[in-house]
Image (spheres, rainbow, N blue to C red):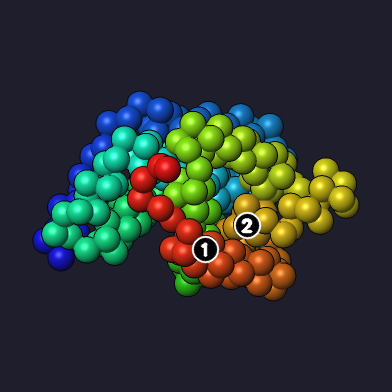
Amino acid sequence: MRGLNALALHELRLTLRRGESVLLSFIVPLILMLIAGYTAEESSSVVPGFFALALLSSAFTGLAIATGFERKYMVLKRLGASPLPRITLILAKAAATLVIELLQIAVIWLVAIWAFDFSPDVNWMGFTVVLLLGTVAFAGMGLLMAGRFRAEVTLAAANLIFFVFIAIGDFLIPVDVLGDTVASIASVFPAAPVGRLFRWSMGVAEFDLSAVVVLLVWAVTMPLLAARYFTWEEA
């Protein structure tokens, strides 16, 4: 546990020191939320989408890029050769990612209270389940990419997927207004279900069983695929 705590704190400090991580995780979501909230008819339905965006930026994009370059520069290989078990390295990354997400959600929530008088009727059990499942699904995707592709490919692909998910992830724009075809495609990826279920947990949307099923499938399959195909150094 001492090694896990030390490594998790180290991961957390590294993340907060990276300017691009702070920009992606805190500044950009806040700016987008203020714009979307002031232009939307109902700001309470906008804010939960940014909780989903927080998970996407940290558990997927940030984790994939950081891990990809650690793998490129053989940081992971050296850590993997240390006395710490490799599972400890993975758990430390997961713990640091979860702390970053909680910080993001806290900041978004406080700004939403200040800007929009945000006071939802929260289903805390549902909120926690969506948070954990979304984190696992996005982190599994990120680690799978980081562990299979070169760092530069991961960087480009992670950013591309980030912006695609913003467009079709039911974060800023209700996916239904994009047409039936786009809505059908979006519904099989994890971003839109996370956004939809966060809205349900905030009491501004109906419960969607199909979104739960889709998110569960991604949360189970992505970590398994990442564990199966992750390599600790580039070929």
* Residue under the image location 24 percent in, 54 percent down: 80
Residue at mark 1: 225
Mark 1–mark 2 Cα distance, whole angstroms, equals: 16 Å
Front in this rendered view, residue 183 or 110: 183
Q: Mark 2 belongs to which amino acid?
A: Pro
Say if 210 sits above or below 84 in the image.
below
The spot of residue 31 in percent (x, y) is 53, 29
The spot of residue 82 in percent (x, y) is 16, 54
The spot of residue 26 in percent (x, y) is 43, 35
Say if 90 sits above or below 39 in the image.
below
Report if residue 33 is visible in the image: no
Front in this rendered view, residue 111 or 167: 167
Residue at mark 2: 190
Q: Mark 1 belongs to which amino acid?
A: Leu
> Left of 3 or right of it: where is 176?
right
> Left of 116 or right of it: where is 9?
left
> Left of 111 or right of it: where is 175?
right
